[in-house]
């Protein structure tokens, strides 16, 4: 197999050299409404990797990104946290044989962090890619939550652009007594 980034021979989809030199997380936090959103990369750093999400190779790439970011983050978080926390992925809709956000939430599983797979699904399939803020506001995803109620949760998505999707998801979760501690995303589109 070859590294998806540098094309050198590798046992992994992203080779050790690229992980250590090109894809070192640069964690950033921003406030979206009342929620903190933590992102591991700027979109410009991993945009080409994120574009594989609905292609067969995206399964391996998203799994590798989750192992590099979400898993170690949760290991550290659960060491310093008492009690269970639920992991809620935003719209873990299966396309091309897998749900890319589900790969992120699966990597976060531990004794005290419990993924709630496919519990927050959009009833409207709206593509926000390249759309304006007004379009996003005029076309909500209309999420439905079927997971565990009255719990603490971490919201997970792959990308944050305007934060509209995360805010809509948080609002639906709050209606079910879910306290969203914060949100995690792989990448933040906003550049400084």
Image (cartoon, rainbow, N blue to C red):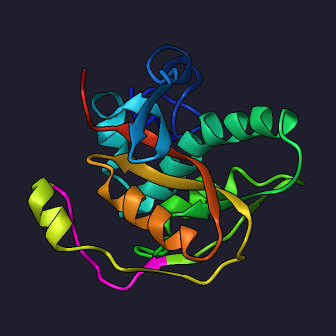
Give the side of residue 16 with respect to residue 144, left or right. Answer: right
Q: Is residue 38 above or below residue 60?
A: above
Residue 148 location, x and y as percent? Answer: 72, 76
**Residue 158 appearing in the image:** yes
- Residue 76, image x, y percentages: 77, 31
Q: Is 21 left, or right, of 103 in this rendering?
A: left
Instruction: Give x and y (percent) for residue 69.
Output: 60, 35
Q: Tell me which segment is drawn in magenta.
A: 121-129
Q: What residue is drawn where x is 35% and y is 61%? A: 165
What residue is drawn where x is 26% and y is 73%?
140
Q: Is residue 171 magenta?
A: no
Q: Position of residue 44 (x, y in %)?
A: 27, 30
Q: How many marks?
A: 0
Instruction: State the predominant SS element of the stretch in magenta.
Output: loop
Q: Say which residue appears at 51% left-offset and 24% top-offset.
A: 25
Q: Which one is nearer the viewer's eye here, 61 or 151?
A: 151
In the displayed structure, 19 sits above or below 52; it is above
Location of residue 43 (image quadrant): top left
**Foreground: 146 or 25?**
146
């Amino acid at each position: 197999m070859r590294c998806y980034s540098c094309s050198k021979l590798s046992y992994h989809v992203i080779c050790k050299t690229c992980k250590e030199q090109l894809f070192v997380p640069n964690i950033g936090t921003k406030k979206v409404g009342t929620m903190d959103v933590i992102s591991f990369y700027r979109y410009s750093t991993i945009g080409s990797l994120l574009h594989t999400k609905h292609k067969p190779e995206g399964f391996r790439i998203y799994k590798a990104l989750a192992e590099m970011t979400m898993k170690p983050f949760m290991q550290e978080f659960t060491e310093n946290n008492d009690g269970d926390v639920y992991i809620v992925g935003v719209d873990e809709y299966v396309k091309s044989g897998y749900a890319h956000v589900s790969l992120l939430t699966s990597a976060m599983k531990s004794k005290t962090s419990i993924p709630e797979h496919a519990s927050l699904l959009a009833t409207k399939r709206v593509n926000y890619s390249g759309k304006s803020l007004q379009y996003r506001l005029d076309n909500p995803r209309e999420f439905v939550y079927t997971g565990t109620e009255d719990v603490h949760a971490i919201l997970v998505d792959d990308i944050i652009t305007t934060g509209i999707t995360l805010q809509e998801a948080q609002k639906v979760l709050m209606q079910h007594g879910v306290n969203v501690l914060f949100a995690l995303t792989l990448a933040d589109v906003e550049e400084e």
